[in-house]
Amino acid sequence: MSADIYSFKTRTLDGKELDFSQFEGKLLLIVNTASQCGFTSQYAGLERLYRDYREKGLVVVGFPCNQFGAQEPGDASQIGAFCQQNYGVSFPMSEKVEVNGAGAHPLFAYLTKTLPGFLGTQAIKWNFTKFLINQEGMPVRRFGSTDKPETIEKVIKSLLG
């Protein structure tokens, strides 16, 4: 298993390679997302964080996932259209992935092992779990679904200096 966030790759919703090496020196907020979840409105806050802090070095990356209540049933074009039309999402969006279990994307296997959740659980409990990676590529904080983007802004600001 890789110990370097910059060695991971995924594909975007439009099928292009997204190589995490391009994010060296950036603060990363990685989020598993879903279009039909009670937390879906967090897209608005995530987009605001991205727009407000991207010039200072923040990158938000969304990873649609259908593992929680089948709340992301759409294909890539449906997910992309939903995010754009409803929330104006401009941050990078991965293709749909699994975040738990044997089929978990390697990035999430790494993140959940490096930053276990409540009581040491590695599994992600629900959509909109967030992982904050510092500018040196080290995972530093894990936030649950109920942690709204607005409430983690102060942590982001402190890490951006």
Image (spheres, rainbow, N blue to C red):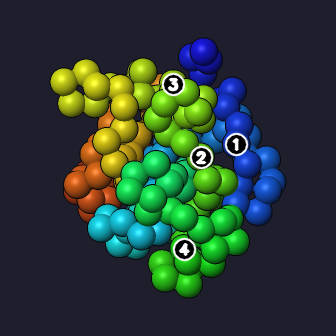
Q: Quadrant of residue 13?
A: bottom right
Of mark 4 and mark 2, the one earlier in the sequence is 4
Q: Residue at x 50, y 62 (%)?
A: 72
Residue named by callout 2: 97
Within-10-Å neighbours for mark 1: few <14, some 14–19, many 20+: many
Marks 2/1 in contact by CB < 8 Å: the verdict is yes
Q: Residue at x 46, y 48 (%)?
A: 67
Q: Nearer the viewer, mark 4 or mark 2?
A: 2
Answer above or below: position of 128 versus 46: above
Q: 99 or 56, which is in the foreground?
A: 99
In the image, farthest residue toward the left: 119
Q: Secondary structure at mark 3?
A: helix
Q: Residue at x 42, y 21 (%)?
A: 113
Marks 4/2 in contact by CB < 8 Å: the verdict is no
Q: Position of residue 30 (x, y in %)?
A: 48, 46
Residue named by callout 3: 110
Q: Secondary structure at mark 2?
A: loop
- Distance, label 3 to label 2, CA atoms, is 14 Å
- Distance, label 1 to label 4, CA atoms, is 19 Å
Q: Looking at the picture, which amino acid does disc 2 mark?
A: Val
Q: Looking at the picture, which amino acid does disc 1 mark?
A: Thr
Marks 1/4 in contact by CB < 8 Å: the verdict is no
Q: Position of residue 146 (x, y in %)?
A: 23, 54
Of mark 1 and mark 3, the one earlier in the sequence is 1
Of mark 2 and mark 1, the one earlier in the sequence is 1
